[in-house]
Image (tube, rainbow, N blue to C red):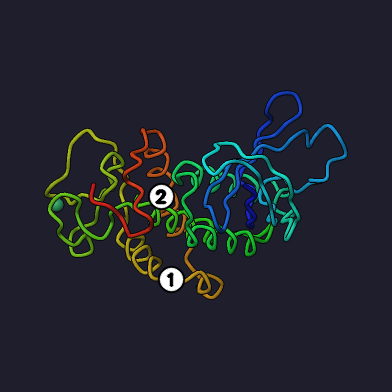
Amino acid sequence: MLSRTEGIVLRSSVFGEADLIVTYLTTDYGLVKVFAKSPRKMKSRFGSSLEPFTYSKISFIGKEDANLPRLTQSDIITPFYALRDDYNSFVSLCEILELLMHFLPERDPNAGMFSLLHKLLSKIRPGEGNELYYLYCKVRFLGLAGYLPKLDACGRCSKQTLEGAGGRFYVSHGALICDACKTDGAAAITLSQSALRFYLSFMKWNFSNIDRVKAPAPLVSEIAGLIDAHIKYIMSRPLKTAAFNGGKGPLKR
Ligand SMILES: [Zn+2]
């Protein structure tokens, strides 16, 4: 069966002597892995279209349940090559692609994820501070995957954290825990009230707001540090596939 869709390359890995396995996030099928025959050997018709971030119209052939269909066509819509040439953009974007590949099940269409990734690639300007975009996308992807950290209330007693005297984020709980409920010995990150306020309003932003808001850099980096620690912890744990709930919001832990 021939399938046609549009996709963004998340990763290309060498397979055998000259072949590649390309992981795409597609509009119609979600995450898809395809096999690309010898693109490195001959002057391939795929050209540079199999590089990470490239957005293309693609076709692949294989039985519906085949786990590795073969790529038959790939026509670039937007190459996003400037993002590969800039080291900082490349590294930051690859972190986000890893996050997607970790959480997304294969062959489960998710229009929200695709649209967010496409917007991100379109917005990043190499050489400029794009931290807020990366942070926004990480938080949104975590939300769509059901893995948002719990920061609005204590993870134990549910008391609103903004009313309490500050909060400590317990990485192993994925939640802020108030002073009354705190656990000794577990790794925790202190979160300032102003960073918490910033985060709670940040959660209500749209992608298009980001250009207009002047966010204080120390608050952005405080939240970014917490989110990165949270991501690092959950990516080090075995993934509960049941936790992915199709973007219906965070699950109860
Ligand atoms: Zn509490």
Q: Residues within 10 Å of mark 2 (few under 14, many from 20)?
A: many
Residue furthest top in the image? 17
- Most foreground residue, 36 or 173: 36
- Most foreground residue, 155 or 32: 32
Q: Which residue is disc 2 drawn over?
A: 227
- Most foreground residue, 73 or 136: 73
Could you tell me residue 194's position as x and y percent? 34, 63
Figure check: 160 above or below 244: below
Query: What is the distance, in whole Å, between disc 2 and disc 1 at their CAs?
Result: 17 Å
Figure check: 153 above or below 41: below
72 sits left or right of 181 in the view: right
- Most foreground residue, 154 or 244: 244
Q: Which mark is residue 205?
A: 1
Could you tell me residue 39's position as x and y percent? 78, 37
Query: What residue lies at 57% left-to-right and 51% top-to-bottom?
Result: 25
Residue 133 sits in quarter: bottom right
Q: Is mark 2 within 8 Å of ligand 1?
A: no
- Label 1: element kind: loop
Are dots 2 and 1 in contact, CB under 8 Å? no
82 sits left or right of 240 in the view: right
Q: Residues within 10 Å of mark 1 (few under 14, many from 20)?
A: few
Query: What residue lies at 30% left-to-right and 55% top-to-bottom?
Result: 250
Figure check: 155 above or below 248: above
